[in-house]
Amino acid sequence: DVKVTQSSRYLVKRTGEKVFLECVQDMDHENMFWYRQDPGLGLRLIYFSYDVKMKEKGDIPEGYSVSREKKERFSLILESASTNQTSMYLCASTRSQPRSVLEKLFFGSGTQLSVL
Amino acid sequence: AQKITQTQPGMFVQEKEAVTLDCTYDTSDPSYGLFWYKQPSSGEMIFLIYQGSYDQQNATEGRYSLNFQKARKSANLVISASQLGDSAMYFCAMREGLYNTDKLIFGTGTRLQVFP
């Protein structure tokens, strides 16, 4: 089974801190994604990546950046954390070949980030 | 416009009864996939079932079935013989196939509570 590992289950940071959320997958997937989940809003895509050193903005990229230096690792960076970034962050991965609309996402267990 | 709409924020069902969770979608792409995920209180996202736009028959996986009505653009999840362990958030999602993107678009979710 695919394993997607997020480094922290719970994280508490202060406003203005630089925050790194790490995600590692072990199935050689090309595509990796960062979503944020908020009550009543569902999951919203922040950034995704098709390959090493490639990144694409999702629906809500403001205030975030990402890094993909190795295929298995995709990092989400909050340059200067703010209280409105308190949320559950979910990392996911999927393969891109062969392409299929039915290729399912594999998720990590999430990081609940609180910014105080 | 919302791509994925889940109109039921919460649902209650008695153990052993069947329950239907609603999902409607909006796309002009002829090729798309529809997915349902379960998220227990532990936070992990568990893939349940999917349906392709060209599939003639409704998908089934054990106690889960997807009631796919293409003309109505609906993809309701039916859980038969509910169990206490089915209590969780349920998310409907879609992937559109035309624009070479692999991202999933999620709805806002339905919280299902199963009572004895």
Image: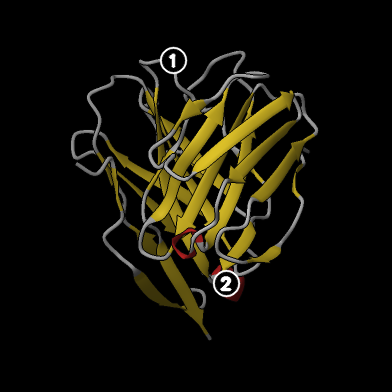
Q: Nearer the viewer, mark 1 or mark 2?
A: 1
Front residue (pair B20, B56): B20
- The kind of residue on which mark 1 rests is Asn
Q: Which residue is mark 2?
A: B83
Chain under callout 1: B
Residue B15's x, y, as percent? 51, 78
Q: Which residue sits at x=72%, y=44%?
A: A22
The residue closer to the viewer here, B5 or A108, is A108
Residue type at mark 2 is: Gln
| Quarter of the figure that contains the N terminus of chain B | top left
A40 lies left or right of A76: left
Q: Which residue is mark 1?
A: B100
Q: Secondary structure at mark 1?
A: loop
> Residue at the front extreme?
A16
Check the image and tell me how it is coloured.
Answer: secondary structure
Residue at the (77%, 41%) spot, across then down: A3
**Neighbours of disc 2 within 10 Å: few (<14), some (14-19), many (20+):** some
Residue A66 higher or lower than B85, as above or below: above
Q: Position of residue B14 (x, y in %)?
A: 45, 80
Q: Is residue A74 above or below residue B43?
A: above
